[in-house]
Amino acid sequence: MLNKERMFAYNTSKRSYLEMVLVEKYIGKLLEIIYIDRAGNVSQRRIEVHAVKGDLVRATCLKTGEPRAFRKSNILAYAPVKVKGRDSHAS
């Protein structure tokens, strides 16, 4: 479950906050995201980010183990996943 105090909220201009920050810093890290697909279905998932190119975030879904591509503009919210007592974006 996402910690709502640490969640970055979707902004109203149809650009996600994830799109406005340097998302490359999350490559190799774990994120929990809330995502809306093309059909309008909303899901919450944990992903490991592998690459960011343009509007696409290439990642592995940790639940299914399958590679996925997510449009940054469809990521409604995200939060780094804590690993072993540390934030996943801490180096």
Image (cartoon, grey):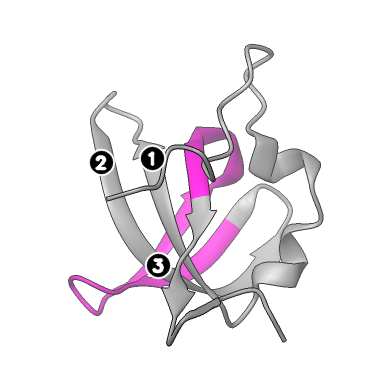
Q: Which residue is mark 2?
A: 43
Q: Give the left or right position of residue 86, taking residue 36 as reference.
A: right
Q: Mark 2 vs mark 1: which is more N-terminal?
A: 1
The local secondary structure at tag 2 comes to: strand
What is the three-letter code of the residue carrying label 1? Tyr
Quadrant of the frame with the C terminus: bottom right
The residue stretch that appears in magenta: 57-78
Q: Give the left or right position of residue 26, taking residue 44 as reference.
A: right
Q: Quadrant of residue 41?
A: top left
Residue 7 x, y percent position in the rendering: 52, 41
Residue 77 x, y percent position in the rendering: 49, 38
Q: Give the left or right position of residue 5, taking residue 15 as reference.
A: left
Residue 80 x, y percent position in the rendering: 53, 62
Q: Which residue is mark 1?
A: 35
Q: Is residue 77 magenta?
A: yes
Q: Which residue is mark 3?
A: 47
Q: Mark 1 vs mark 3: which is more N-terminal?
A: 1
- Residue in view at x 72 percent, y 59 percent: 23
Give the Cα separation between the discs numbered 2 and 1.
5 Å
Query: Label 3 crowding class (10 Å Cα cut-off): few <14, some 14-19, many 20+?
Result: many
Q: Are marks 2 and 1 in contact (CB under 8 Å)?
A: yes
Nearer the observer, 32 or 7 = 7
The local secondary structure at tag 1 comes to: strand
Give the Cα separation between the discs numbered 2 and 3.
12 Å
In the image, farthest residue toward the top: 12
Does the magenta stretch mainly form a helix, a strand or a loop? Answer: strand
What is the three-letter code of the residue carrying label 3? Ile
